[in-house]
Amino acid sequence: MSSVVLILGAGTSKECGAPLMGEFLDVAADLLRAGDVKETKPHFERVFDTIGKLQAVHSKSQLDLTNIESIFTALELGNIIKRLPGVDAEEIPQCIASLKELIVKTLEIRIRFPTKHSHIGAPRPYDNFTALLEHLRGNARPSHSVSVITFNYDIAADMALFRANLGPDYVIEQAPKRYAQIPLMKLHGSLNWASVVDPTGLKPLHLSNYFQEYSIQGWDEEGSCMLPVGSQLVEYFRKREKVEVNPEPVIVPPTWNKADYHHALTKVWAAAATNLSEAEYIFVIGYSLPDTDAFFRLLYALGSVGKSPLRALIVYNPDSTGSVDRRFRELLGPAAQARYKYRPIPFTEAIEEINSMFPGRT
């Protein structure tokens, strides 16, 4: 049985409402101006005030103040060196906490989940994505083992796997019993992962447990709702499991320096490396390999070494400028380049194309 690894980036969630990283701050600012973030308004205001103070950096250096990944990285480094323009050192952790709250609230508002009566489904095209996974595992000839690696914080893929009775298996702890769980390795954390205060650790709020406690939130006339899982972590764990967790979910910046998070996420990163080393087919969908993410470059370099021969490595991304293609070609060694293809198409079309590569049983 050959192994298939699918790697999902921000482009996959864009099709269900999530903004790309370069658009994230603009979307958050619009939500703030529209009055849609009343309970988290102070956090939004603190973030934009901090960004305003970072304008001083431009007198001597360059810093992309429009990209949330760049801001996240700057705040994390500022916390390490205890220095951030216009911000007292002891206030930097509060700025980071506010940025995480901004990320959580923006994603919760923007990503809508389809509803029918009391049933909440997975946003399109993630329902088609899980159909692809089921095809690869059960109907394709020969069948394949499947795992998913994602850089996304949102729970769109999680919801799709849950509704398809495929887990997800976060590889952090034993999940509630689901049929034939598929590993979902979220390298940068997740809206539904909490960090325990004492003793320190990481606890995912599994969707099966969540729906036992909460019902539909914000159901609209168009038949969709929001799922504020990240905003309810403290309430859930305090009430149902008698555990104190930190207010912000486990959300990790896309940088090489993840030292503060490695104790919590070691299992996730190790599992991702193992799956990459065993993969014969790697499909990268909606991930642009940004220059800031040196972490994945190293993870791929170390994790992709294995005994399994690589049959195909295909990158699907709507970018047609050649920049994403170039970054991936620079990442790959000669053997991988011989198996590499770049396809400038979106998530929905990528699902269809991958499905066609693996004929079903007759």
Image (tube, rainbow, N blue to C red):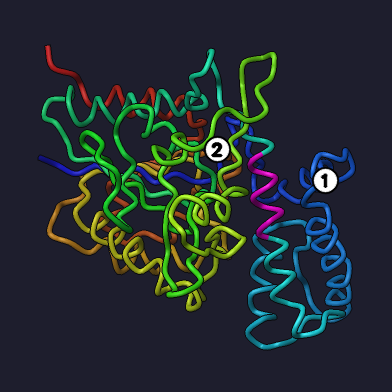
Of residue 332 and residue 53, the one placed in the foreground of this image is: 53
Residue tagged 1: 38
Q: Main secondary structure of the magenta part?
A: helix
* Image: 167 above or below 191: above
Marks 1 and 2 sit apart, C-alpha to C-alpha, by 25 Å
- Residue 362: which disc? none
Q: Is mark 1 on a helix, strand or loop?
A: helix
Q: Is mark 2 on a helix, strand or loop?
A: helix
Q: Give the range drawn in magenta.
A: 100-108
- Residue 203 falls in which quadrant of the image? bottom left
User: On the picture, is 7 further left or further right than 152?
Assistant: left
- Residue 13: which disc? 2
Q: What residue type is labelled 1?
A: Lys
**Residue sitting at 77 percent across and 43 percent down?**
27
Res. 361 in view: yes
Q: Closer to the N terminus: mark 1 or mark 2?
A: 2
Split into 4 quadrants, where in the image is the C terminus? Answer: top left
**Residue sitting at 85 percent across and 74 percent down?**
58
CB under 8 Å between discs 1 and 2? no
Which percent across, then down, holds residue 280? 20, 46
Which percent across, then down, holds residue 236? 52, 49
Of residue 242 and residue 248, the one placed in the foreground of this image is: 242
- Residue 1 falls in which quadrant of the image? top left
User: Does the magenta portion include 179?
Assistant: no
User: On the picture, is 272 further left or further right than 143?
Assistant: right
Q: Which amino acid does label 2 sit on?
A: Ser
